[in-house]
Image (cartoon, rainbow, N blue to C red):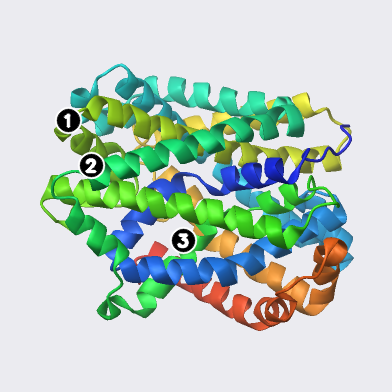
Amino acid sequence: MDNRNTFQGKIGFVLAAAGSAVGLGNLWRFPYLAAKYGGGMFLLIYIVLAVTFGFVLMVTEIAIGRKTQLSPLKAFGALSKKWGWLGKLATIVPVLIFPYYCLIGGWVTKYAAVMVTGKVAEAAQDSFFGEYISATVDPVIWFAIFIVATSLVIVFGVNKGIEKLSRVLMPALLVITVVLSIYVVTRPGAIAGVKYYLLPNIRDLSAKTFLAALGQLFYSMSLAMGIMITYGSYFSKEEHIEKATRQIELFDTAIAILAGLMIIPAVFAFSGGDKEALGTGPSLMFVTLPKVFNSMPGGSIIGAMFFILVLFAAITSSVSILEAIVSGLLDSFKISRLNATLLVSVYGIVVGIVCSLGFGVWNGITIFGFSILDFLDFVSNSVLLPLVGMLTCVVVGFVIKPNVIISEVELNGEFKMKHFYRAMVKWVAPIFIFAILVSGILQGFGFLTI
């Protein structure tokens, strides 16, 4: 069994954790929700929630990981034997997410290859995406390429794999995002989208806007997935958790805001100001945006840069999801990192193929009305993720008490937000997360639309 490594410095930890947080949720879900819920008002609410609610949850998870030096599978049991089962529940989240996230990563890899080879007009055709994902072999090949790349990073471990990758990809990701954002906002017709996105309108303030922003926070910041606990267990005791958390938040929120600045004005200019053109999920990323790139001068180059950006974001996130699972196996069994990675990768490939076939030869198979991929997404993101987040707050607030986390944070200096933290983790956060849980379930079964 491997000894537990640590990141070689705070920068390595921050970039790795930010890489986990910056993923597909930032690059396709955030712009869609921002467009749907009033642009500037959604953005304002999201930023306020990120620096309060998100900060509290991230500090909690990193501190739990560093204090216990364990993966989430074992960490909760180390804090309270009666609550050890919560670690198992937390580990189920990345186990469910990993296969279908890598499948979507395979879609991104395919589109990056298409754009790099100058076939933007081909990708812009209405039938291209549907024909691709419904094929039997092609999507599985690209999915396998993506999952093998993810696994290789994990095999190399924390320092030579995760940290080295993050130190290269995260700065590159930031540069590409800034370049694309500047290019897009200077296009004819884009300024209307910029105004809509950045200027809050009080008429757009609603409970749905608040719930949508709060739900997005979990996607954007990799909360309640066991990832931040895992990365926290590799975080040096010499570093300050509060400062590192602020830096992760800043990086993640900046990328999300820039993603919106890159996508919303581009679609506004392409559609003549129609925000409905910003469809959710795959329809935005794989159908609408190729059309936008095809209509732009130099669209082939811009499209290639965009999908390389998305690929970087997807792989840093998939690496963190896989590491959360592998770390649990290393803590629980006498097994090498290589064997643990192979075991999880084989599982991921099998389930991922099932998800892929759900769009093709098995498209008639549904679970409670969901496709196979959508069902895994619903259970993991709409049910388990908020449930784990809420129960984590309960454990910290009422079982082990907030002072356990505060003392871990204060190993390297004062926790300036400790009074705020104590109130949030005990009372405010659990209530808000319960609202996310209820709204997510109601949405999944069609009783509520957000």
The residue depicted at 67 percent of the width and 30 percent of the height is: 164
Q: Is residue 271 above or below residue 311?
A: below
Earlier along the polypeptide chain: callout 2 or callout 1?
A: 2
Q: Quadrant of residue 108?
A: top left
Earlier along the polypeptide chain: callout 3 or callout 1?
A: 3
Screen quadrant of the N terminus: top right
> What is the CA distance from the residue labelled 2 to the residue labelled 1?
17 Å
Q: Please state the horizontal and vertical placement of residue 14, each as a whole percent of the image.
A: 66, 47
Q: Please state the horizontal and vertical placement of residue 198, each as a whole percent of the image.
A: 31, 63
Q: Which mark is residue 284?
A: none
The kind of residue on which mark 2 rests is Thr
Q: Which mark is residue 288?
A: 2
Q: Is residue 418 above or below residue 166?
A: below
Look at the numbered disc 3 and give the secondary structure of its residue.
helix
The kind of residue on which mark 1 rests is Pro
In the picture, measured across the screen, residue 400 lies left or right of residue 258, that is right
The residue depicted at 55 percent of the width and 33 percent of the height is: 169
**Residue at label 1?**
297
Earlier along the polypeptide chain: callout 3 or callout 2?
A: 3
> What is the CA distance from the residue labelled 3 to the residue labelled 2?
21 Å
The kind of residue on which mark 3 rests is Gln
388 or 167: which is nearer to us?
A: 167
Q: Nearer the viewer, mark 2 or mark 1?
A: 1
**Residue at label 3?**
216
Contact between marks 3 and 1 (CB within 8 A): the answer is: no
